[in-house]
Image (cartoon, rainbow, N blue to C red):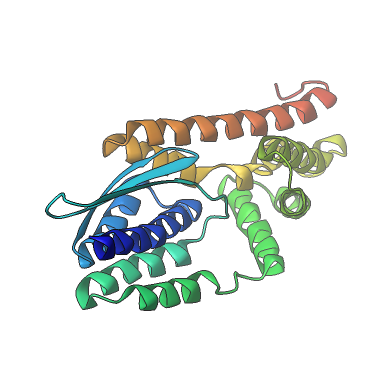
Amino acid sequence: MNNVHEELKSVSQFLTEYATCLMASGVHTSRIVRNTARIAESFGFEAHMTLFHKTISMTLRSKDNAHVYSTVSTAKSGAINFEFNSELSALSWEAYDNHLPLDTLWEKFHAITSKPRMNPWAVWILVGFANASFCRLFNGDWIAVAAVFVATLVGFRIKQILHFNHYFVFTISAFVASLIASITMWQHWGTTPDIAIGASVLYLIPGVPLINGIIDIIEGHVLAGTARLINALLLIVCIAFGMGITLLMMGGKLL
């Protein structure tokens, strides 16, 4: 009995770490549940999970219901990383197909999560080009595109270096980016200053939480999905507030 209990405990510790890492990197709820349950099944256990915005509750039990182990863990905060998502999902299939021992799973898990992230300066430049491309797609002229590029670089850099409440960070980043883009209107540069101002904050739109929230609700994880959507809505309000300050400073010409 003690051996089974210790195995449940050890596997549960790995699965909670695995699930929180998936959640932090931007995976929707049903995928977290499927991947975690798949690894649990490779050990002959069944995993039952409840995910909230800040916590993950998991109960691991043997197939005969004779042994049960429950854990509650705090969800991690982290940047969205689709590479982690893909590799951690592949790890769950490898564990299921090859019945990997727990030590090997930990080794492979740490190898994945310890990989260096993309250079932040490269991300900074690429985000600037991506947002400027949005401006061009919305028929912004080349002066507007250049303004959005500069505004995005400054706003995104602020987002990178500030580490307090993320709602305030989004507000400040939106305000600074839109303020820089509004120079095109102040100085009467180009013919599409309104597009420049509108596109300058698009890099802040929380697309992944919005998509994951809708997926969660459709797949029956209503509480988790609602929490994601509310968080995304608050971020959008912060973006609108920061941009609204800029527009008021300009005399409300575009309001």
Which residue is outermost to the left?
A: 64
**Residue 89 place in picture, x, y as percent:** 34, 65
In the rendered image, which quarter contains the N terminus? bottom left
Residue shown at the point (46%, 67%) measured from the top left: 83
Up/down of 231 relative to 125, above or below: above
* Residue 123 quadrant: bottom right
Up/down of 243 relative to 34, above or below: above
Up/down of 26 relative to 182, above or below: below
**Residue 131 place in picture, x, y as percent:** 63, 52
Which residue is outermost to the right?
A: 187
From the viewer's perspective, tell me whether residue 163 is left or right of residue 210.
right
Residue shown at the point (15%, 49%) measured from the top left: 65
In the rendered image, which quarter contains the C terminus? top right
Residue shown at the point (72%, 26%) measured from the top left: 244
* Residue 160 quadrant: bottom right
**Residue 61 place in picture, x, y as percent:** 23, 52
Q: Nearer the viewer, residue 12 or 240?
A: 12
Up/down of 254 relative to 60, above or below: above
Q: Nearer the viewer, residue 182 or 168?
A: 168
Residue shown at the point (25%, 62%) measured from the top left: 4
**Residue 64 place in picture, x, y as percent:** 11, 53
Q: Nearer the viewer, residue 62 or 216?
A: 62
